Amino acid sequence: MSKRAVDEGILNNRNFPLENQHKTIIQGQVDYNGKVLKFEAFQDSYTGIVENAWPVLEWARY
């Protein structure tokens, strides 16, 4: 489910670079049984690999 949320966040350009850490924060959401579930994820800026994704109640402001 987090993979779909990350793909949705990339598609809708909800990503925020963290220059000092060489990472990008991606904020995405998916529909699950009629509810919207939000996720945030770290993506490595060099490799493009999503290193970690987690569910959140609200997205952080970057």
Image (cartoon, rainbow, N blue to C red):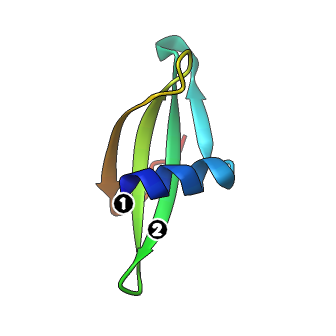
Q: Quarter of the image for the N terminus: give it.
A: bottom left
Q: Quadrant of residue 41?
A: top left
Amino acid residing under circle 2: Val
Rendered image: mark on residue 62: none
Vertical placement of 43 versus 39: above or below? Answer: above
What percent of the width, then of the height, locates residue 34? 41, 87
Residue at 57 percent across and 57 percent down: it is 8
What percent of the width, then of the height, locates residue 38? 41, 62
Vertical placement of 17 versus 19: above or below? Answer: below
Mark 1 or mark 2, whichever is nearer to me: 1
Callout 2 crowding tier (Cα within 10 Å): few <14, some 14–19, many ≥20: many
Residue at 31 percent across and 48 percent down: it is 54
Q: Does residue 25 appear to the left or right of 14 in the view shown? A: left
Q: Which residue is mark 2?
A: 30
What percent of the width, then of the height, locates residue 42? 43, 33
What percent of the width, then of the height, locates residue 56? 33, 57
Vertical placement of 44 versus 57: above or below? Answer: above
Between marks 1 and 2, how big is the CA–CA gap?
Answer: 7 Å
Rendered image: mark on residue 1: 1
Total marks placed: 2
Q: Does residue 11 appear to the left or right of 28 in the view shown? A: right
Q: Quarter of the image for the C terminus: give it.
A: top right
Residue at 35 percent across and 85 percent down: it is 33
User: Extreme bottom residue here?
Assistant: 34
Callout 1 crowding tier (Cα within 10 Å): few <14, some 14–19, many ≥20: few
| For marks 1 and 2 on the same chain, the one whose residue lies earlier in the sequence | 1
Q: Quick check: marks 1 and 2 in contact, CB under 8 Å?
A: yes
Amino acid residing under circle 1: Met
What is the secondary structure assignment of the residue under circle 1? loop
What is the secondary structure assignment of the residue under circle 2? strand
